[in-house]
Amino acid sequence: MGERSTCIVAFCLFLLIAMMVMIVDEKNLEVGVDPAYDSFYENASKFLENQGLTSVGPASKVIIKLSLAVWAAIIGTLFTFPGLRVARMHWDTVKYYGESKVKTLLHNINFAMPFVLALLWVQPIARHYFAVRVFSGMTKPLMTSQAFDTLRVALVVGTIALRLALMPQQLQAYLDMAQRRLDLQKKEAGRITNIDLQKKVASVFYYLCVVALQYVCP
């Protein structure tokens, strides 16, 4: 029941966020739905007209945006538990490599980059400062619009490469959970059979492939 309630709450939350994103003007958030819909509507209307049909065209923009919001909410719900798993692995990894400032910095960057990448599609925060605004002492923006798009793609590729490079350390932090379970079992009162203890430890290793997918897919 706990997992079901968490999924329902996550779906409602992500649906609300997705609907808020869909109503934001394209001048502030580069979703690309409005230009894509206008182009699709024009081409679909011409196609139907050439076929001699009297249809008014494809579905309205509201239906399209609502469908996209529901789809985004479903995807967000599917990634709820992987997100929690990645957050726990990041916490354990930072504690394990706390003495190395370089590794700690890399893991923190790896954890924060998805949020930073999302901000690059917010025009007032990203494109306006990099490709539109002309700072004092300069005659043109820092980069062209095409260069900014290339920068975003490069950062996405770099984030994927960094995540894969740090994957062994993240999975090792997850495997250390077996030792923590043993240490916790030693502090608990009562007895436990060897078979139950082996199952408790082996379940960590059996779940490794799932954890790897949860780390890579988001």
Image (spheres, rainbow, N blue to C red):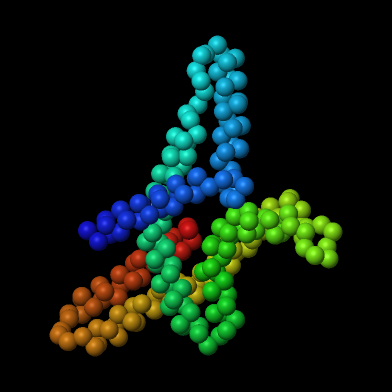
Q: Tell me the residue at 56%/14% (across/down).
A: 51
> Looking at the image, can residue 214 be seen?
yes
Observer-nearest residue: 55 or 183?
55
Observer-nearest residue: 97 or 207?
97
Q: In this image, 21 relative to 74: left or right?
A: right
Q: Is residue 70 above or below residue 93?
A: above
Report x, y in % for residue 90: 46, 73
Report x, y in % for residue 12: 35, 51
| Residue extending farthest top | 52
Q: In this image, 87 relative to 27: left or right?
A: left
Q: In this image, 108 relative to 188: left or right?
A: right
Report x, y in % for residue 175: 39, 75
| Residue extending farthest left | 190
Observer-nearest residue: 157 or 179?
157
Q: Tell me the residue at 54%/79% (across/down).
A: 104
> Looking at the image, can residue 157 be seen?
no
Quadrant in the rendering for residue 38: top right
